[in-house]
């Protein structure tokens, strides 16, 4: 990630945090189903991180996320995707009515990318 992208990402994360903390003085507790959904959303995020890093081991592959740049280091991918997952959890915590939608959507997107990246690794094709 270049310096400008890092600044934009962290400013966005800070804004999300402050909006979240002012949105609902007492968010309700997480239900059992929401906790299970959070677990699977996190697992999908980890799978996406791993497969992205492995797909990028091939110099013919490149990242399409402009925040990361075309050939990010593994550490940048992990930091970016971890912060993205943390931001999703913060939003879900403070807006309980959105939990299911946020976590299901994030898990679906991450799983799709993980499967796509896994296919790239197996076939040796670029993004």
Image (spheres, rainbow, N blue to C red):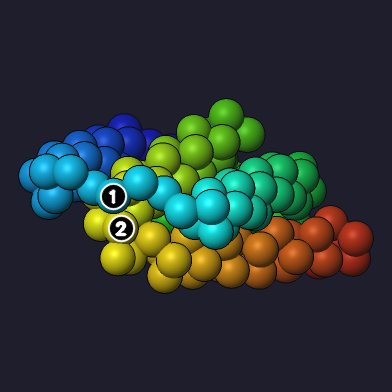
Query: How dense is the environment of label 1, judged by Cα within 10 Å: few (below 14), some, or many (20 and up)?
Result: few
Q: Residues within 10 Å of mark 2 (few under 14, many from 20)?
A: some
Which image quarter: residue 73? top right
Residue 105 higher or lower than 81, as above or below: below
In percent of width and height, residue 17 lies at 21, 40
Residue 33: % across, % down? 55, 59
Q: Say which label, 1 or 2, has the lower sequence index.
A: 1
* Residue 94 visible: yes
37 on left or right of 95: right
Residue found 59% across the figure and 69% down from its top: 108
| Dot in front, 1 or 2 | 1
Q: Which mark is residue 19?
A: none
**Quick one: SS at disc 1?**
loop
Label 1 with label 2: CB-CB less than 8 Å = yes
What secondary structure is marked by label 2? helix
Q: Which residue lies under the disc numbered 1?
A: 28
Position of residue 30 in the picture relative to residue 20 (left or right): right
Residue 70 point in image, percent of width and height: 54, 51
Which is nearer the eye, 84 or 60? 84
The residue that appears at 25% across and 57% down in the rendered structure is 95
Q: Is residue 41 visible?
A: no
Q: Residue at x 42, y 70 (%)?
A: 101
Q: Which mark is residue 96?
A: 2
**Observer-nearest residue: 41 or 73?**
41
Cα separation, mark 1 vs mark 2, equals 7 Å
Work out whether residue 69 or residue 119 is closer to the camera in this orientation and state it. 119
Q: Residue at x 76, y 45 (%)?
A: 54
Please identify the quarter of the rendering in which residue 77 is found: top right
């Amino acid at each position: 990630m270049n310096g400008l992208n890092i600044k934009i990402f962290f400013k966005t994360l800070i804004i999300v945090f402050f909006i979240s903390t002012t949105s609902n003085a007492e968010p309700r507790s997480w239900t059992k189903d929401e906790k299970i959904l959070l677990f699977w959303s996190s697992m999908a995020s980890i799978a996406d991180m791993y497969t992205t890093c492995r797909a990028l081991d091939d110099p013919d592959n490149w990242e399409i996320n402009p925040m990361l740049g075309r050939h990010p280091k593994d550490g940048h991918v992990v930091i970016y995707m971890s912060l993205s997952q943390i931001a999703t959890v913060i939003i879900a915590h403070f807006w309980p009515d959105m939990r299911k939608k946020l976590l299901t959507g994030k898990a679906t997107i991450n799983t799709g990318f993980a499967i796509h990246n896994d296919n790239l690794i197996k076939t040796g094709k670029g993004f």
